[in-house]
Image (cartoon, helix red, strand yellow):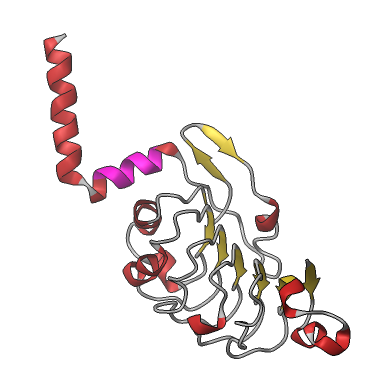
């Protein structure tokens, strides 16, 4: 498999076949929309960051993608464009124009392997209880807008997420901690939380 720096390099004249391409770098190409990438059947990692993309089309993206870099664009919404990417593990979307936190997380809820995501520098990151909402809706997330911590065990940045802010000066926010998971559970599952608390109290009383 090969990493290609431009779509033109993947053409047969360049001695490459589409099926040989598993990494494609289209960053800083002044793109305003996604090109049709459906012919790359084995594409796993795709860089589209630092463009001027303002519209996404799911038909252009291979469902086998595991890493997708869309940071530093002009994307206002991902609704209807990414939900078929159920193999995604890494998704960087910071510094766009994303609005609608509920719609954004709904689009990603089938991605049960998604462990690293960034949404900061978007309007959705300023919505009330933004982090707790994302943690609740996307429970597989281990690294959110920075380094993560699950159940007291430190999770280091995976190689693909080491340059989260390549062109934007930023302070990396804290990661997902077990305390945040508890708070998100309490906030979004209040009735179940009350039941569990009652059961726990009953056990203590019986003891």
Type of secondary structure dominating the magenta stretch: helix
> Where 192 sits versus 42, above or below?
above
Q: Nearer the viewer, residue 202 or 20?
A: 20
Q: Residue at x 48, y 46 (%)?
A: 176
Q: Nearer the viewer, residue 190 or 3?
A: 3
> Where 94 sits versus 148, above or below?
below
67 part of magenta stretch:
no
**Percent position of residue 25, x then y:** 73, 75
Task: Give the tally of numbered discs.
Answer: 0
Name the image quarter holding the C terminus.
top left
Q: Residue at x 46, y 33 (%)?
A: 151
In this picture, residue 134 sits left or right of residue 207: right
Q: Residue at x 62, y 62 (%)?
A: 170
Q: Residue at x 25, y 43 (%)?
A: 186
In this picture, residue 117 sits left or right of residue 164: left
**Percent position of residue 148, x then y:** 54, 45
Name the image quarter holding the N terminus.
bottom right
**Percent position of residue 9, x then y:** 82, 84
In this picture, residue 148 sits left or right of residue 45: left
Instruction: Name the quadrant containing residue 161.
Output: bottom right
The region drawn magenta spans: 179-186
Instruction: Name the quadrant containing residue 138.
Output: bottom left
């Amino acid at each position: 498999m090969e990493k290609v720096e431009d779509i033109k390099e993947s053409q047969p004249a360049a001695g490459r076949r589409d099926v040989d391409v598993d990494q494609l770098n289209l960053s800083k190409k002044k793109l305003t929309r996604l090109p049709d990438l459906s012919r790359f059947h084995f594409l796993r990692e795709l860089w589209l960051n630092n463009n001027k993309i303002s519209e996404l089309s799911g038909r252009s993206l291979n469902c086998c993608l595991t890493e997708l870099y869309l940071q530093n664009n002009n994307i206002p919404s991902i609704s209807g464009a990414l939900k078929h990417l159920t193999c995604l593990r890494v998704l960087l979307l910071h510094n766009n124009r994303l609005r609608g936190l509920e719609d954004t997380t709904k689009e990603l809820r089938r991605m049960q392997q998604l462990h690293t995501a960034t949404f900061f520098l978007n309007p959705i990151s300023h919505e009330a209880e933004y982090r707790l909402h994302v943690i609740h809706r996307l429970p597989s997330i281990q690294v959110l807008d920075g380094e993560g911590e699950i159940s007291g065990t430190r999770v280091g940045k995976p190689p693909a997420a080491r340059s989260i802010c390549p062109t934007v000066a930023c302070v990396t926010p804290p990661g997902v901690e077990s305390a945040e998971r508890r708070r998100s559970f309490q906030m979004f599952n209040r009735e179940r939380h009350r039941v569990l608390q009652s059961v726990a109290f009953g056990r203590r009383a019986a003891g």
